[in-house]
Amino acid sequence: MAEPIQNQSLVESLSKPPAQPRKLTDLQIHVARLYGTGMERRKIQRALVDYLAPNQALEMRVRVQQARRKLLKWERDPAFRDEVYKNAVVDVDMNLPGVLKGVVSKAKRGRVDAARLVLELTGRHNPKGDHAPPSVVVHIDGIPRPTVKQIADAEVVDAEGEGG
């Protein structure tokens, strides 16, 4: 006979659908953008201390500590980290043209590795070594071939165009 389940709360939590991701506040989205562009926590907490710790009655040092704790709490939130990642990817994508221009300029100056990378990115070089020429197949079908009898029965034409 099957044993009863010991931990009922575990069974209940497994039977529930996964929780929907939490909606971020406008302030969290703004802070995530700053993180995504590479701004450090210390600079963010100092710049946004009035928003992160709005209690003006407290000493500035205490408010900065509160702002730091709030940022650390947000950093542990998966939804916040996803927003930071999304913004970081946008920042990287926007900087790629400059990176590619830099690689091209290094290739022009003679850097072989940069030249190879540029050629690989443009599809002009295959690093795997597939240098086999493309195969060409000529398929001729439906053309009648002359037989020996047809050649023997043919008229001989001289250079002036008269038949023999």
Image (cartoon, helix red, strand yellow):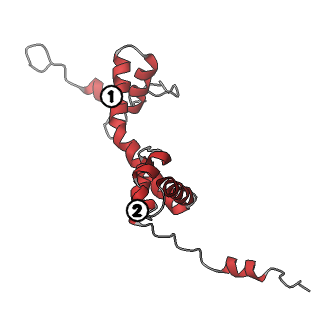
Residue 27 disc label: 2
Q: Secondary structure at mark 2?
A: helix
Residue 143, picture quadrant: top left
Task: Check disc 2 and give the amino acid type.
Answer: Leu
Image quarter of the N terminus:
bottom right
The location of residue 102, given as percent across then percent down, is 36, 26
Name the residue rendered at 54%, 55% in the picture: 65
Left or right: 94 in relation to 40:
left
Q: Are marks 1 and 2 in contact (CB under 8 Å)?
A: no
Residue 11's place in the image compared with 67, above or below, is below
The location of residue 120, given as percent across then percent down, is 42, 29
Residue 129 disc label: none
**How packed is label 1: few (under 14 Cα within 10 Å), some, or many (20 or more)?**
few
The location of residue 122, given as percent across then percent down, is 36, 31
Image quarter of the C terminus:
top left
Which numbered disc, 1 or 2, marks the residue closer to the eye? 2
Q: Tell me the CA gap for discs 1 and 2.
A: 35 Å
Residue 83's place in the image compared with 138, above or below, is below
- The mark nearer the N terminus, 1 or 2, is 2
Left or right: 160 in relation to 68:
left
Residue 135 versus residue 94: which sits nearer the camera? 94
Residue 112 versus residue 81: which sits nearer the camera? 81
Residue 101 disc label: 1
Name the residue rendered at 41%, 55% in the picture: 48
Task: Check disc 1 and give the amino acid type.
Answer: Lys
Q: Is residue 139 visible?
A: yes
The location of residue 108, given as percent across then percent down, is 34, 17
Residue 99's place in the image compared with 162, above or below, is below
Residue 69, picture quadrant: bottom right
**How packed is label 2: few (under 14 Cα within 10 Å), some, or many (20 or more)?**
few
